[in-house]
Amino acid sequence: MPTAVHAACPHDCPDACGVLITIEDGRATKIQGDPAHPVTRGFLCAKVAKYLDRVYSPDRVLYPMRRVAPKGTCGPGTPAQQAFERISWDQALDEITRRLRRIIAQSGPESILPYSYGGNLGALNGASMDRRFFHRLGASQLERTICSSAGEEGLKSVIGVKLGTEPEQFAHSRYIIAWGANIHGNNVHLWPFIEEARRRGAKLVVIDPYKTRTAKFADWHLPINPGTDAALALGMMHVIINDGLHDTGYVSRHTVGFDALKARVQDYPLEKVAHWTGISAADIRRLATEYATGRPSVIRVNYGIQRSERGGMAMRAVAMLPCLIGSWKEIGGGLQLSTSGAFGLNKTALEMPELMQKALGRPARVVNMVQLGHALNSLDAPPLQALFVYNSNPAAICPNHNQVIRGLRRPDLFTVVHEQFFTDTTDYADIVLPATTFFEHKDLQAAYGHYYLQVSNQAIEPLGECRSNVDLFRTLAQRMGFEDECFRETVDAMIDRVLDSPNPWLKGITRDRLEHEDHIRLDFSNDGGTAAPGRPAERSSAEVAPFLPFAEGNFPTPSGKAEFYSEALKRQGLNPVVAFTPPDESRHGAHAAAFPLELLARKSDNHLNSTFANLPSVRKLEPTLGMIEMHATDADARGIRDGDRVRAFNPRGEIVLQARVNRSVPPGVVAARLDWARFGPGSRNINVLTSEKLTDMGNAATFYSVSVEVELFRA
Ligand SMILES: Nc1nc2c(c(=O)[nH]1)N[C@H]1C(S)=C(S)[C@@H](COP(=O)(O)OP(=O)(O)OC[C@H]3O[C@@H](n4cnc5c(=O)[nH]c(N)nc54)[C@H](O)[C@@H]3O)O[C@H]1N2
Ligand SMILES: Nc1nc2c(c(=O)[nH]1)N[C@H]1C(S)=C(S)[C@@H](COP(=O)(O)OP(=O)(O)OC[C@H]3O[C@@H](n4cnc5c(=O)[nH]c(N)nc54)[C@H](O)[C@@H]3O)O[C@H]1N2
Ligand code: SF4
Ligand SMILES: [Mo]
């Protein structure tokens, strides 16, 4: 008899879908979106709809492997497996613990670096036993800021917390701005709510330098110059404030710094903003007016705008808009960057940073994940001797690829990779360990695009000798002789522990309930955790929906108000109000003469960063892999025609791609897709051109501030 098991997709995606897996004779035979999940609504994205291809792929890593060929020898055409021999788990664990012990004896535990990110966002398999293990070891800490921390800091500098409009409310919006947000590609479960709103007459505006599928389907696409969003938001606020379109009541009750903001926007007349952004003064005026008057209006801002040098300030500027027009009061108003701040899980209990005290008597040093190339090649006192990779594929996704590879090639670097597949990174691993997929283990799943918590049940037995991240690090801890009780904790006990949190919105949500109900919406009728200390939210307990966190202010900022002026930013040496400075790597930067084009090293609509890129059925959904898209003006100026082979280069590297001359990008901008390096010419990908430079806030990556030149390739 077929049975259906409820699971939750743990991939790095705001949608965190509820999934039903059909099992027959111990084998998964079907996957579908859970029709009962209010955001998943019964469908999955194209990549996870084909997940059986991934789980049962002949290319899965199923057994521990040891390298028998030099590092980096598995280029195109060489089956990765040939570089390895199969070993037992015992042999693998013995070798790992022996080498880690030797490294610790020689140069101390901080010469070991864990490297993980978004492969699995399950509460347990994302960050739990692994963190305990590396804390207890005293390994260097990884600063995990490759994705979202600039936006997070920018948002919090205004509203204090990562909360936003729930997806269901978008159906009630009249004016929707997708700002640096590729909804149709990266957040597809928001789309039906937007379509519902549009059927009722709502307008969708997309602000994105690239003509995404979202932009093609929109009512209005504004192809903004990369890295100039703060200027656009300032221009909009110039119109809103000077035309008196702001909500004076909301502003006076719930914000601080309005006078400073009012003075600041006078520095941004529309002609000046038009010059920076490439959007005409008339269009800026129209956008501002429609946004302020077409109520309720909502902004789905996503992480696209903050992958630029001053991405924190850009997010700060955009976050001011709903505070200025008071749209937080309205169902279908406000803004969403992320919903993750609502879950308030007891992560400290899972990660146990206090274990570092035991190992080192102090917190271990911190290494930024964006700067892995630098860390592997140049870090001192102590230099890195071991890299332990899981939930990540740094040889594909990390900026400044050439430096990363140079570091990974070091024969003296001991590299362990826990993976589901032989990726770009396993090409440099000494030991590869087999990892389960979410079909093969249990977990708890929060979200960053909605407010439902889910339990993800194990649907099938692990394939081959695969182990989950939790199991791997539990075993390793025991092999290292760590006797702490926490290394014996079961998965269920850990789920109980992480749910045991002071967050009022988790009150009454237990593992048992989750196992019976599959998904549970956070209980916002309980007293709001958004309130600053001493400022209890004024919601009645009978009120269950909709969630309007800032209708009555209650911003958990230092002042308890939305901050148009921030003392905290001032202390960090940043502009306490808001300001625009163009990226150094842009048409306005110092190197613009030699490298005049702005590169968007973008994600694929059907991959998830580098995940799924190796599956033929998914790969064929991506028509622009291996290509660089450019505008006819830039192509003509360089004698490039559609289909020509071209060389894209800057001081960090070069890559040969096929030119695609089309209307996807405005003049001055080129775009290419992130792919596995292995599939690229010379085993390279677009990250040879991206930089390790960090953003103004949050130490994040600047994937979208990249100056390049492109020329015809002559072999
Ligand atoms: N299909 C698919 N889904 C995914 C992912 C994936 O790789 N593929 N990745 C997942 C992950 S890790 C994340 S973080 C989210 C990210 O999802 P999004 O936040 O949507 O992130 P991006 O695709 O990086 O950027 C969104 C858009 O911003 C545009 N953009 C670039 N620079 C600028 C700029 O300066 N200003 C403006 N206004 N726009 C700009 C890009 O062209 C892009 O279309 O998606 C997740 N979902
Ligand atoms: N050029 C360019 N580079 C980018 C980006 C971009 O837009 N452009 N986006 C950046 C962003 S936003 C992000 S978030 C990062 C993402 O960088 P990563 O987090 O490294 O993301 P993925 O490429 O998805 O790689 C995750 C890996 O984890 C593995 N994995 C999945 N589940 C598990 C598990 O349970 N256990 C273990 N051990 N492994 C597992 C998968 O097989 C996969 O190889 O990339 C960044 N890099
Ligand atoms: S990747 Fe995103 S859209 Fe696709 S199934 Fe997972 S959560 Fe849903
Ligand atoms: Mo990300």
Image: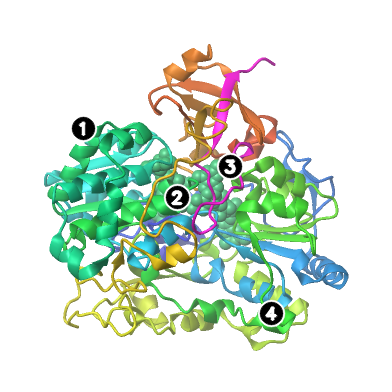
Q: Amino acid at mark 2?
A: Gly
Q: Residue at x 29, y 40 (%)?
A: 206
Give the residues drawn in magenta, as a range. 687-715
Question: How far across and down, in percent of the image, does residue 649 sit?
Answer: 62, 28
Question: What's under tag 3, amino acid-wise?
Answer: Asn
> Secondary structure under badge 2?
helix
Percent x, y for residue 35?
A: 29, 59
Residue 675 to residue 306: above or below: above
Examine the rendered structure and indicate whether residue 592 appears above or below residue 99.
above
Mark positioned earlier in the residue sequence (3 or 2): 2
Q: Earlier in the sequence, mark 2 or mark 1?
A: 1
Q: Nearer the viewer, mark 3 or mark 2?
A: 2
Identify the secondary structure beneath mark 4.
Answer: loop
Residue type of the residue flagged with mark 4 = Arg
**Label 2 Cα crowd, 10 Å radius (few <14 / some 14-19 / many 20+):** many
Q: Residues within 10 Å of mark 4 (few under 14, many from 20)?
A: few
The residue labelled by disc 2 is: 311
The stretch drawn in magenta includes residue 325: no
Q: Quadrant of the C terminus?
A: top right
| Rendered position, 455 above or below 51 | below
Give residue 463's position: percent from left, percent from top.
61, 60
Q: Nearer the viewer, mark 3 or mark 4?
A: 4
Reply above or below: 240 against 549.
above
Sequence-wise first label, 3 or 4? 4
User: Residue under circle 3?
Assistant: 614
Q: Residues within 10 Å of mark 1 (few under 14, many from 20)?
A: few
Residue under label 1, please give it: 282
